[in-house]
Structure formats: C-alpha cells, structure tokens
Amino acid sequence: MEVIYQPYIDPEYECLIERIYPPWVCIDNDTCKDCTLVKVDSANKHGILLEMVQVLTDLDLVISKSYISSDGGWFMDVFHVTDQLGNKVTDESIILYIQQALCARRGGITKEARTCLGKEVAPGVKDLALEMTTKDQPGLMSEISAVLVELGCNITAAVTWTHSSRTASIFYVEDGLKGGPITDPIRLSNVQEQLENVIEAHHEKGEKRSVRLTTPAAGRTHMERRLHQLMYGDDDYEMCRGCDGGDRGHKKGCDRTHVSIESCKEKGYWIVNVRCRDRPKLLFDTVCALTDLQYVVFHALVSSRGTMADQEYFVRHKDGYTLNAESERHKLTLCLVAAIERRISQGLRLDICAKNRMGLLSDITRVFRESGLSITRAEIGTYGERAVGSIYVTDTSGHDVNLNLVESVRKEVGGSVIAVHKPQTWAAHGGSSRTSRRVPNTRVEDEEDRPRLSFGSLVWSQLERLSSSFGPIRL
C-alpha cells in the first residue's frame, strides 16, 4: 500500500479557519448567456463537495458543467446550472436559498432560508424514519404501507429504490392520533416488530435484510444519500456490470455506464473517469459514492454533451493511501456503476397528483398489487392538501405494463394520473427509443421528448401558486 504523507491539522483549527474565512458564494447570471454560474470558495473539509451538490440537486437544478479544485486546504468550485426547462435561475427566493444554504455552517440550513423559499426541501426531517432493505418482491410496498396505517401511523413521505433484485425503502411517519413524532418506546417497538414480520414473510434463509427506526435528530442524513448507503450496505453493487470496453476505451456509440481508474503517481492521485448517459442528479450520485467510500476529490471536471455525460475525478483515500490493490479498484468501479444505475428504473412511470387523505398510499399500492403491477421505484410526498409523486411499475415478471391497465388504475386511484411511457431498453441500456402510446382518458408522454421533471419539480409546476405553506399532511 502506497501512503501519501500529509501534515496533521487539528480539527479545532479547521473550525477556526472556517469561522475566519466563511464560504463565499456568487450567483452569476451575466457571464454565460444560457446558464447561471454558482461560484463557491470555502475552507476545505471532507464531504463539502457533496454538500454543495446536494443543495443544488434538492432544488431540481440541472448541473451541466462543473470545475472543482480543492488542493491546499481551500475549496473552489464553479457550477453551471439551469432549471429543468433549461432557463437561468432568476427566482430571488431560490437564489437567496442557495446563498444561505451554501454558507450555512454544518449544523444545517438557516430557518430564514427555508422560510423565504416557501418549500420543504428535505421532507420528513421532523418525522420518524423507517428504513428497510430486503429482497425485492411484488406487493411489498403495499403490505408495508397497509401495516403502518393499521398501526395508526400517518405516512408523510415515502421513497423506494430497487436494484439487482434488492430493494431499499424509507418511510417517514407521524402519530396518526396526535400528530408529530411517535415517542412511546413500546409503540415504537411494536411498529418495528410488525414491519420485521412483513419482511420475514418474504425472506429466504441466509438472505440479508434489515429494519431500522430513526427518530428525528439534527444532522439526519439526506434521504437519497441514505438510500445509497442502505443499498451499498445490502451489497447490491456486487452484481453490477458496466460497459465491457475495458482498457480499449469507451466503444463508439455505446451509452452504457463506463468507469475506468488510472494511476497518476507523480501527484499521488487516482484518476477516475466516468462516462454514461446523462440524467438528473447524476453528479450527486457519483459524488455521494466517492464520499461514502471515504475518497477525497481534489480536482474534477464534469460536463455533458448531448445525451452523454463525462466526469473526471482526481482522488485519494481520506487516510492518504492510493488504490494499489486490484480488488480495491474493482470495488470502487462496481460501486460507482451501482450508484449511477440505482436511479434508473425499469417500467412505466406514473406521475400522481391526488387529494391527500388518510391511507392514500396504502390504497394506491393496493390497487397496483391487485392489478398485477410491481413497483420498481417510488417517491411520493405531500404539498398542502395534495399528494404528489412518481411511481414506476412493471408487471410481476419485470416486463412492460399493458397500458390498458392504466385506465382501470386511474379510476380506482382518482385524481390526476399521467402515464409517461419509457421503453425498457432506455432503463436497462440507455437506448433513445422514442415511442409513445395513448391510453383513453389518461395522458401518456414520451420520456425523452418532455422535460425531465422530478418529484420536486412536479410539485413546483402544479402546486406552487396554490399554497404558500408546506407541511406533512396525512397520507
């Protein structure tokens, strides 16, 4: 193992430097005609890059290019960002939020920044979090949400990812009778026991599984970062296979995920190159993987062109050593491929916007289960009196959904259901097939031809002008 020796810096001294030289943030709408530049200078610390990217992606901003440098104990970064429609960021509330969030100390974003934005950027931070990992099974989300309703738990937000036949879920719940967090230890123990029974019913001997309850606390891990951690802890990366181009480089026309790692012995870095199909939150996912694997990014260049994105990182391990063992290099490659592919889900995407009510999520997922649909990914929350989210579905065999089922699902679910047809080839290999089919009385759109709106931007576009307050409402 090759070790790069670095001077020891007392943590208290690092905090002192941060107080003397607080982060400097500039929002520049003049330099570039087609994007906003977010420039950040700050004292360097482990994880700061992820914090910066997290703030921007939580606002559903698209990062098309970024230059990163953090040598010498100082962090300097430039992000080229637009909104989901490709426009500059001109909303004063969003600009104020970015400035205050990026300048906020590690304790969290200031209350004033959250208030001026008028939107809950990190839903569920005040609620009990239920974290689960297990083997992916059709109908699992339906059973979990039904049990929670029976136990008197109101689901305020929920997110589920599936990858490599494994699933990770986080449900944020509150007390259904009194509102607010559930604090009774006996009741908490009963909730955990009942959820473990559900997971156990689908579990085979020797398979990994986990159920964990997390009470509200300052500094709670970001929801999507926590999902990455759960799936990594479940070893979902072991089955990953990126592009097999190897040392011959990325094959012309190939749009699968390609990761290569080379040595830069002169500077003591490892150069990590990632090329894959571009999509929202791609930078967050790769930086999240590097950070949680304890790698420090000293320099990076990120850009996208057309449908493809290129990322180049100069990294070292936090402890100072480089990747000498082939096994370490192989593991980092697989983990990066997994982090990129977890958010790419197969199936038909259903965007849901319905009047919020007690047990809504349980009813929606029950309809899916009874209709023979399997959920591959879901993200749903509340905004005022509305429940808004996106759910990806396939049939129970993992194949494309018969779109004739969508109309019957829409009638039972109620509210507004938008079916966005995304061919399975795009989910698996990034193909750019452009086909769409229309279901009677149900809106169907081609994923490639419409702006790539996430859950957050869907909330903004449909409901922002209807309410100035946001809070967890019974779901």
Image (cartoon, grey):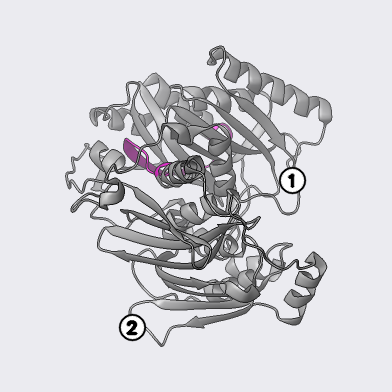
Q: CA distance from mark 2 to mark 1?
A: 43 Å
**Mark 2 nearby-residue class (10 Å; few <14, some 14–19, many ≥20):** few
User: For the residue marked with disc 2, what is the amino acid?
Assistant: Lys
- Name which residue lies at 51% across and 27% down: 141
The foreground one among 359 and 112 is 112
Viewport quadrant of the C terminus: top right
- Residue 252 locus on image (x, y percent): 18, 53
Give left or right: position of 272 versus 452.
right
Give left or right: position of 202 versus 73.
left
Residue 357 image-quadrant placement: top right
- Name which residue lies at 57% across and 63% down: 468
- Name which residue lies at 30% across and 46% down: 246
Q: Please tell me whether residue 153 is drawn above or below residue 330 in the rendered image.
A: above
Callout in the foreground (2, 1): 2
- Residue 40 locus on image (x, y percent): 56, 77
Label 2 close to label 1 by CB (< 8 Å):
no
Can residue 89 be seen from the camera position used here?
yes
Give left or right: position of 183 versus 294.
right
- Residue 190 locus on image (x, y percent): 74, 22
- Name which residue lies at 34% across and 69% down: 86
What residue is shown with label 2? 33
- Earlier in the chain: of badge 2 and badge 1, it is 2
What residue is shown with label 1? 216
Q: Please tell me whether residue 127 is drawn above or below residue 218 in the rendered image.
A: above
The foreground one among 309 and 312 is 312
Helix, strand or loop under label 1: loop
Can residue 421 be seen from the camera position used here?
no
The magenta region covers 341-360
**Mark 1 nearby-residue class (10 Å; few <14, some 14–19, many ≥20):** some
- Residue 62 belongs to magenta span: no
